[in-house]
Amino acid sequence: MADISQSILSLLNRKIFCLGDLMLDKYVLGATNRISPEGPIPILDVKKEVKMLGGVGNVARNLSTLATETHLVSLLGNDSIGKEVEKKLDKINVNKNIVKDSNRPTISKSRFISNNQQILRVDKEKVLPISKNIEKKIFEYSKKKILKADAVVISDYNKGLITKNILKNVISFSKKHKKPIVVDPKNKNFENYKGATIITPNIKELELVVRKKLSNENEIIKYGKKLILKFNFQYLLVTLGKSGMILISRKKVFKLDAETKDVFDVSGAGDTVVSFVAAGLASSLKIEEVIRIANVAAGVVVNKSGTSVAHLSEMLISTNKNDYHLSKVMKLSEALRVTKFWYGKKEKIGFTNGCFDYLHPGHIFLFEQAKKKCSKLIVAVNSDSSIKKNKGPSRPKQKINTRLQVLNSIPSIDLIIV
């Protein structure tokens, strides 16, 4: 699995432009043990409330785990929820141009969850097309951001921001400057997305477009190819939930089984797929490799609750989960024999140390910079007891075997000791 680990690491530090509907996702978590005396409805005893970025904001969150330079153009209402969304964007370091529209509220979705089961969703939104003046501002901001990016994401939740005019102009401008375009479509009129590099509907969205229940793989491929030819897409990626995903092009079909059959929550999984596809296209990876990585990322997030993201360490663990032989991990006595051999071969040996609890792009940068200074890199990782002593009883978040498995998959590391 070294090759896919290397491919995942190649996604780091790309430049992505995101255009789309921005919203706040709120999760109210609790338990229901009583029925209301005021009506035949359950009473939710609230234990916890969680707020996170939704829509294109969740795309930006996923990209932040890859240390991406994210450029965002979107729309918010001039309200308290809009301010909350902007603060959350600032925390993930997004380069943003946000247009304010006083005529509409910032979109919010509140999900009420009892014992891991969603019992109610409340949406606050005003769905209508934006004004010509706002449309012009959105495109002017977008042009500047597209020029700075390696790939373009259009996240269309069909809330009024992504008009036919904006799509036509943004896709045309992106193609003119040779930027790959990834579209996450919620509008069933695919004519609007004409010319996009790749479009990523789920199976329900595809069925709405073709106005037909697609009962098997052959039908999905048949109608997918028709849409590709009709609207000049290079690829159509259909996500199938527990059944995986199918990539369709004019000449080829590439099918992947889901990484996990135990789906906990699909909220935001489409955003994760779009994020990793965009980063992959920006890295000039082959499309099959891009889809493999996106499939791994989707498998990570559907095992979590809420609009979650796929962290780098989780991705590397997932791709190496069947590789139990930690070939780079050695006891001190063995490591000393190996380094003595390296010295005899005139190798230049480097050494670094850390906890590496939830590996992030900063760690990868450290390893890569260290490896540039030497021919063999040794990494010493703190034991669980050492971390607990230095960082407190709640650490480490990941036990030693998990951390070793992640480090073992990183190509720039040659030897690991605890």
Image (cartoon, rainbow, N blue to C red):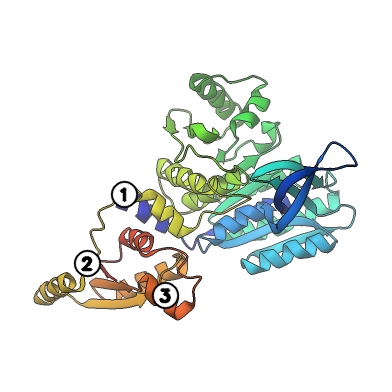
CA–CA distance in space, label 3 to label 1: 29 Å
Q: How many circles with numbers are drawn on the protein?
A: 3
Tell me the tag on residue 387. Answer: 3
**Residue 313 vertical position relative to residue 278 in the rendered view, above or below:** below
Tell me the tag on residue 131. Answer: none
Q: In this orientation, does residue 155 appear? A: yes
Query: Which of 303 and 362 lies nearest the eye of the viewer?
Result: 303
Query: Which residue is rendered at x = 63% and y = 50% of the image?
Result: 306
Q: Position of residue 43 (x, y in %)?
A: 80, 46
Q: Secondary structure at mark 1?
A: loop
CA–CA distance in space, label 2 to label 1: 20 Å
Mark 3–mark 1 CB contact (< 8 Å): no
Q: Can you tell which of label 2 and label 1 is closer to the viewer?
A: 2
Query: Which of 19 and 82 lies nearest the eye of the viewer?
Result: 82
Residue 356: which quarter of the image?
bottom left
Q: Position of residue 214 (x, y in %)?
A: 58, 21
Q: Position of residue 366 (x, y in %)?
A: 39, 73
Marks 3 and 2, the one that precedes in the sequence = 2
Q: Find disc 2 in the rendering and name its residue.
A: 330
Q: Secondary structure at mark 2?
A: loop
